[in-house]
């Protein structure tokens, strides 16, 4: 299995992903705009479920957001659930919605 890669286009849209050779095992779709990193969706291939790939993508995204001083808008249900479950870990980067305050 390869490392986590980030692929962004010139408009700031893209994804973190994990590949196994030519096969994509996991993806976290996102966009970067005006100092925000918006996470839309996280998906892990059925054959790779339960191996911690979503958590690995989450950790890579959080590191990237901190390094680039971005606030995270967790529209993805998985990311939002992790932020709510462990608010102390993500307080510095979490751009909360009205429902989260």
Image: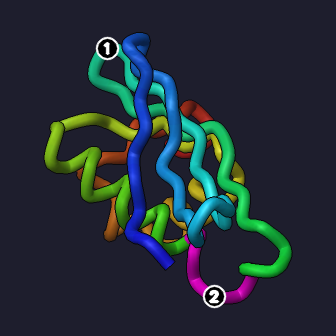
Above-or-below relation of 92 to 33? below
The answer to whether residue 9 is left or right of residue 28 is left
Describe the element under mark 2 as helix, strand or loop.
loop
Q: Residue furthest bottom?
A: 51
The answer to whether residue 52 is left or right of residue 92 is right
Disc 2 packing (10 Å; few <14; some 14–19; many ≥20): few
Q: Residue furthest front?
A: 22
Disc 1 packing (10 Å; few <14; some 14–19; many ≥20): few
Which one is closest to the eye, mark 1 or mark 2?
Answer: 2
Number of the label disc, if any, that sits on residue 14: none
Tell me where the magenta segment starts and ends, as one range.
49-54
Front residue of 84/48: it is 48
On the image, numbered disc 2 is attached to which residue?
Answer: 51
- In the rendered image, residue 9, in percent from the top left (x then y), is placed at 43, 21
- In the rendered image, residue 34, in percent from the top left (x then y), is placed at 31, 14
On the image, numbered disc 1 is attached to which residue?
Answer: 34
CA–CA distance between discs 1 and 2? Answer: 34 Å
Residue at (61, 53) in percent of width and height:
27
Q: Magenta-highlighted stretch: main secondary structure?
A: loop
Describe the element under mark 1 as helix, strand or loop.
loop
Residue at (58, 83) in percent of width and height:
52
- In the rendered image, residue 63, in percent from the top left (x then y), is placed at 26, 58
Residue 36 position by quadrant: top left
């Amino acid at each position: 299995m390869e490392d986590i890669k980030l692929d962004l286009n010139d408009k700031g849209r893209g994804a973190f992903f994990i590949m196994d050779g030519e096969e994509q095992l996991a993806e976290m779709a996102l966009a970067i705009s005006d100092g925000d990193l918006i996470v839309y969706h996280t998906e892990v291939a059925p054959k790779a479920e339960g191996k911690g790939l979503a958590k690995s993508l989450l950790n890579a995204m959080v590191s990237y957001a901190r390094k680039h001083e971005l606030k995270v808008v967790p529209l993805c249900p998985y990311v939002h659930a992790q932020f709510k479950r462990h608010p102390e870990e993500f307080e510095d980067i979490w751009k909360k919605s009205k429902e989260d305050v």
